[in-house]
Image: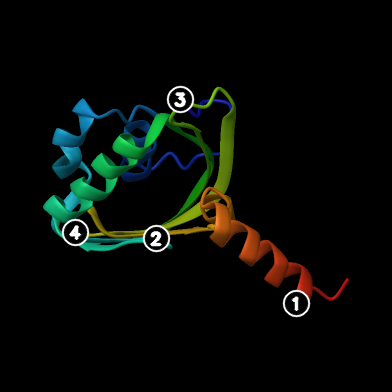
Amino acid sequence: MAGDRPVSDDARVQRVVQFFENLSLPRLDALHEIYAAEARFIDPFNDANGLDAIRRVYAHMYEQLEQPRFRIQLAALEQDAALVLWTFSFRRRGRAQTERIDGTSELRFGADGRLLLHRDHWDPQPVYDMVPLLGAALRWLRRRLSAR
């Protein structure tokens, strides 16, 4: 786990860190341990409300990727809000190379200690690059708009 990294000693944060660093497809049945029934999950591609919808987001991740894994770099808490910095590693199906995405999660805890809001912030460009024509078009656009 995150023993050698700066992670809040708050029990809610520790539970979330442990859950995500040990996430697996079978572990999705335990989402209710960290997410409230009315929780909302938002990332660049999803806006999911409720446990069933959130579970579908994670299940889809396991359908699309091989060996997805989160490693928490930092977790800090202020009252009922936490900020978590993470690295997500994965392999695309049929590929040997491991890829990584760095991101940040904004977490809001409810009175019972479970998540009410989980908002992920990360650059979706590596995902766009997986789509041949879209990736090429967006790389061209990025070069065109760059101040360099």
Q: Amino acid at mark 4?
A: Ala
Mark 3, secondary structure of its residue: loop
Give x and y (percent) for residue 57. 27, 49
Q: Amino acid at mark 3?
A: Met
Q: For residue 111, which numbered disc appears in the image? A: 4
Residue 78, picture quadrant: bottom left
Q: Which residue is mark 1?
A: 145
In this view, the mark in front (4 or 3):
3
Q: State left or right for residue 78 relative to residue 53.
A: right
Give x and y (percent) for residue 49. 19, 63
Whether residue 30 appears in this view of the structure is: yes
Give the Cα separation between the discs numbered 1 and 4: 45 Å
Q: Quadrant of the N terminus?
A: top left
Q: Which residue is mark 2?
A: 43
Give x and y (percent) for residue 106. 42, 59
Q: State left or right for residue 7 relative to residue 49.
A: right
Q: Amino acid at mark 2?
A: Asp
Give x and y (percent) for residue 5. 58, 33
Q: State left or right for residue 73 relative to residue 30.
A: right
